[in-house]
Amino acid sequence: EEIPMQQRAAAASLLGKLAGQPMHGPRVAITLARFLPDGLVSAIRDGPGEAVVSSLEQTTETPELVWTPAMAASLSAQLSTMAADLYQEQMKGRLVDWDVPEQPSGQHVMKDEPQVGGIYVRLFLKDPKFPLRNPKRFLEGLLDQYVSSVAATHYEANAVDPELPLLLSAALVSLLRVHPALADHVGYLGYVPKLVAAMAYEGRRETMASGQDTSRAQAEPIEHDNSDGVPETTVQTPQERVRLSCLRVLHQLASSTTCAEAMAATSAGTPQVVALLMKAIGWQGGSILALETLKRVVGAGNRARDALVAQGLKVGLVDVLLGILDWRAGGRQGLCNQMKWNESEASIGRVLAVEV
């Protein structure tokens, strides 16, 4: 039987009021989330009811919501079956202790799509400027899952998708580019030391695994130009790709003074960021990023700049920078050649070395 539009909208409005109720609203929202995706639960909470009904009948594919009329029909059939079964039990005169299912219906879940904080990560990467309802929640979820996924690869290499850390780091960088103010929040949450430690660990792990054929078997080829301008193909191991993802995240965070100051904070047993970035200058595909990150962290606005300069002097950073600038020592036959820079990269590297 077709339910009038007015009644459907009124029901959606009532659910929205219940979900927004201070005391019991969170429980109502959790119950709704067992049947509907987070995007629709948020739409119900925000209202109005007419907009909710319209959303249920449309095909939607955004970072926050994937929904089709077929999914709506499937959910409707499931709810009808549940209601009919409950009615039959009641007609038998039994006292039914009924509760909603613990697991979601499964009709709206995209099992192959990583979802963080109610956001489909791959769909977000397709449209990073999509206006998220709660970008801070997405950021916190990305940070937590990224650090966890990197740590999981240390112990469960065969059980963890090696692409997951790369996907999450790409989403982190894109989110911070669109919402640069969120970078300060990362510093306040205390994730900067964890990211520095993860990058340092991956660097050590790659060194230990560099001679193993198993690492090279999973490596990804990349191309660069040699001194004659002819493309050469090298490979990146999973460890190299993960450590570069850490570097990209730190590079983006270094634009925040709060995060740059957090990078300068060291304690016993923790890696020093300047020494780590100096080592990263020699990483394939990471040298320019490392130099740019160094430039950002020693910016004039960083109150911990003196500590970073002291770290640089201690580990011989000045000699490395001078080596990059010296055409005879750092040019085609020197550091630039060792880092497999082409002419353009060598020019950029020298400019960054001067700025650092």
Image (cartoon, rainbow, N blue to C red):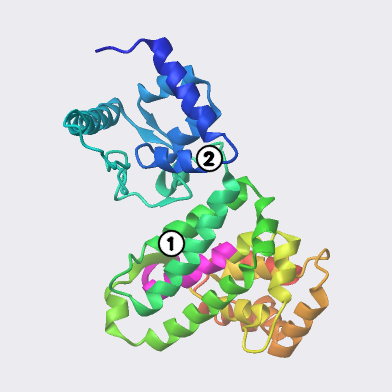
| Residue lying at 49% horizontally and 22% vertically, measured from the top left | 13
Q: Examine the rendering and report whether any part of residue 200 can be seen.
A: yes
Which residue is tagged 2? 24
Secondary structure under tag 1 reads helix
Residue 257 versus residue 44: which sits nearer the camera? 44
| Residue 244 is a magenta residue | yes
Which amino acid type is marked by label 2?
His
* Foreground disc of the pair 1, 2: 2
For mark 1, what is the residue? Answer: 166
Mark seen at residue 227: none
Observer-nearest residue: 196 or 344? 196
How crowded is the residue under tag 2: few (<14 C-alpha within 10 Å), some, or many (20+)?
few
Which residue is depicted at the point 26% across and 39% down?
96
Image coordinates of residue 295 in percent, x first then y, are 71, 67
Q: What element carries label 2?
A: loop
Residue 328 figure quarter: bottom right
Task: Please name the amino acid that badge 1 sits on.
Answer: Leu
Give the left or right position of residue 86, taking residue 272 as reference.
Answer: left
Residue 41: image location, x then y, percent? 45, 35
Q: Which residue is drawn at 61% across and 45% down?
A: 178
- Of residues 338 and 301, the one nearer the viewer is 301
| Quadrant showing the C terminus | bottom right
Q: Between marks 1 and 2, how big is the CA–CA gap?
A: 39 Å
Residue reaching furthest to the front: 93
Q: How crowded is mark 1: few (under 14 residues within 10 Å), some or many (20 or more)?
A: many
Q: In which quarter of the image is the N terminus?
A: top left
Q: What stretch is highlighted in magenta?
A: 229-249
